[in-house]
Image: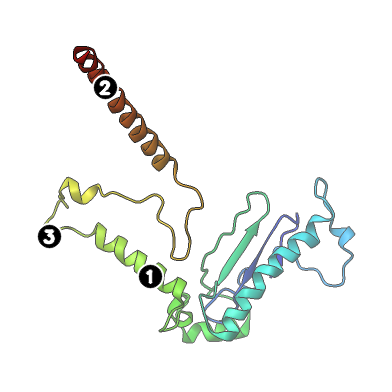
Amino acid sequence: MECSEDAVSGHIQLLIPGETVCFTCAPPLVVTSGVDERTLKREGVCAASLPTTMRVVAGVLVPNTLKFLLKFGYVSPYLGYSCFKDFFPTMAMKPNPQCSNAACGAAGKRKSFFFNYKKYLFAKPTGVAKAGMEAEAKVAAADAPFHADNEWNIRYKSQLWQAVDAYALPKGLALELPSADEFVKSLTSGATDTAIDELEDLRRQPEALNAN
């Protein structure tokens, strides 16, 4: 866990020698130990922003640690936090082959320097992860050519334009009020019925006069 010197950003890292980048490969932004926080204040930076940012980054660290220890979900190798834009970047960084850390260098000689995601994604993913994988599979299938020999990926218009229900809700949820489209439809149908009734009244009036 690290916080930047200007106290407006920070990040967490998963440290596995030889597989992920260590603090020696990528030195921390600032290292403090037993230092008064007031000495870290910079011009234009609020003194209260550092402990606030540290709490936010620590809150991000806790669930990532639980996922690693309890072996569920996806463990982020790097997850950052930027206060200015409320941005949470995530990425994977390979360790430095010339790292001076003995443990990191020795492990790096035995293993690949690319982070192995599959090691931390279990054979039975969680419901959210499974749903994400199924969604990606559907997108990949939709992007595939209609025929195996369809070099130019030519498709019919009906395959490209499909009606999408904008008000589709997950199971267990329902709209409390009717949608605006349904309200307009009801008004339109009501106005049409009124016009038909008025036309029928006009037809009956001449008939009534002739009868008299």
Between disc 3 and disc 2, the foreground one is: 2
On the image, the x and y values in percent for residue 100 come to 62, 78
What residue is pinned by disc 3?
147
- Can residue 132 be seen here? The reply is yes
Residue plotted at (47% across, 65% down):
172
Residue plotted at (62% across, 68% down):
26
Compared to 75, does 142 lie above or below? above
Disc 3 residue type (three-letter): His
Mark closer to the chain start, 3 or 1:
1
Compared to 177, does 11 lie above or below? below
On the image, the x and y values in percent for residue 114 come to 46, 74
The residue lying toward the viewer, choosing from 128 and 37, is 128
* Residues under numbered marks 2 and 1 in contact, where contact means CB atoms less than 8 Å apart: no
Q: Is residue 141 left or right of residue 147?
A: right
Tell me the SS state at disc 2: helix
Residue plotted at (12% across, 60% down):
147
Compared to 149, does 32 lie above or below? below
Picture quadrant where residue 64 is located: bottom right
What residue is pinned by disc 1?
133
Q: Is residue 48 left or right of residue 115?
A: right
* Residues under numbered marks 3 and 1 in contact, where contact means CB atoms less than 8 Å apart: no
Q: CA distance from mark 2 to mark 1?
A: 59 Å
The residue lying toward the viewer, choosing from 85 and 156, is 156
Is the residue marked by circle 1 packed among few (<14), some (14-19), or many (20+) residues within 10 Å?
few
Compared to 128, does 194 lie above or below? above
What residue is pinned by disc 2?
199
Q: CA distance from mark 3 to mark 1?
A: 24 Å
Disc 1 residue type (three-letter): Met
